[in-house]
Amino acid sequence: MAKENTEQKKKKLALKLIERLKEAYPEAGCTLDYDDAWKLLVSVRLAAQCTDARVNVVVEKLYEKYPDVAALAKATPEEIEVIVRPCGLGKSKARDISACMKILQDEYQGKVPSDFDALLKLPGVGRKSANLIMGDVFGKPAIVTDTHCIRLVNRMGLVDGIKEPKKVEMALWKLIPPKEGSDFCHRLVYHGREICTARTKPHCEQCCVSDVCAKAGI
């Protein structure tokens, strides 16, 4: 019974957080620039340990030279690395992008698969990336557990001391209505950058959820 009560409280908290963040960030969306699914796939791989803003600049040069999946699939990892090096981890990212584009070209007619498990089989694609693609490209339920999401849902009280991305994702699936998951995670990114910051003391006095947050003011 106690467990049920705790879960019910967290579900009610989740709905409050969703409502407040919607009001605060009505237009929140993915901060990676893309106009095609395969470009988001490339950008999210480059975004590992790199800012979205830098990725958005770097990919302009990449797409200028390789404008479609076929062109990028023909490029060698070394050629790709020259361009994506500013994003850090250039060698491994270039290798994954090259392998991924080859698979899209050879097995999916140059298209990004809309199946979650198929996405996970692509080189360099983990659960966070696959969820981002599912939610933003295909409009399907998704929970994107990036660093902002993990930090904020712990702080707000939706999860208790869970830092492993998959475990946080599984916990949130039980609390967040499926249709809200993707947008909720995007709004957490905005909120984490602007208010509930990691590198400075959170600005609880400006926070739209401070009255319901488990750790507001701490």
Image: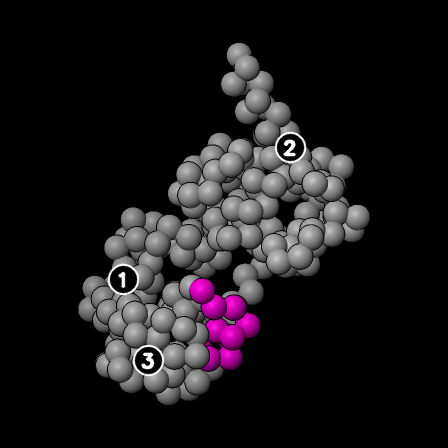
- Nearest the eye: 84 or 104: 84
Q: Is residue 28 visible?
A: no
Crowd tier of the residue under label 2, counting other residues whose Cα lies within 10 Å: few below 14, some 14–19, many 20 or above: many
As drawn, the residue found furthest toward the bottom would be 65
Vertical position of residue 12 compared to residue 17: above or below = above
As drawn, the residue found furthest toward the left would be 106
Residue 142 at x, y percent in the picture: 46, 47
As drawn, the residue found furthest toward the top would be 1
Vertical position of residue 33 compared to residue 202: above or below = below
Crowd tier of the residue under label 1, counting other residues whose Cα lies within 10 Å: few below 14, some 14–19, many 20 or above: some
Q: Is residue 118 visible?
A: yes
Pointer 1: what residue?
A: 123
- Nearest the eye: 187 or 148: 148
Pointer 2: what residue?
A: 13
Residue 57 covered by magenta stretch: yes
Q: CA distance from mark 1 to mark 3?
A: 16 Å
- Nearest the eye: 105 or 16: 16
Magenta segment boundaries in residue numbering: 49-59
74 relative position to 218: left or right = left
Whichever of callouts 1 and 3 sits on the residue coming sooner in the sequence is: 3
Quarter of the image where one finds residue 86 = bottom left
Disc assigned to residue 81: 3
Q: Amino acid under label 2?
A: Leu
Vertical position of residue 42 compared to residue 160: above or below = below
Residue 64 at x, y percent in the picture: 42, 86
Q: Nearer the viewer, mark 2 or mark 3?
A: 3
Whichever of callouts 2 and 1 sits on the residue coming sooner in the sequence is: 2
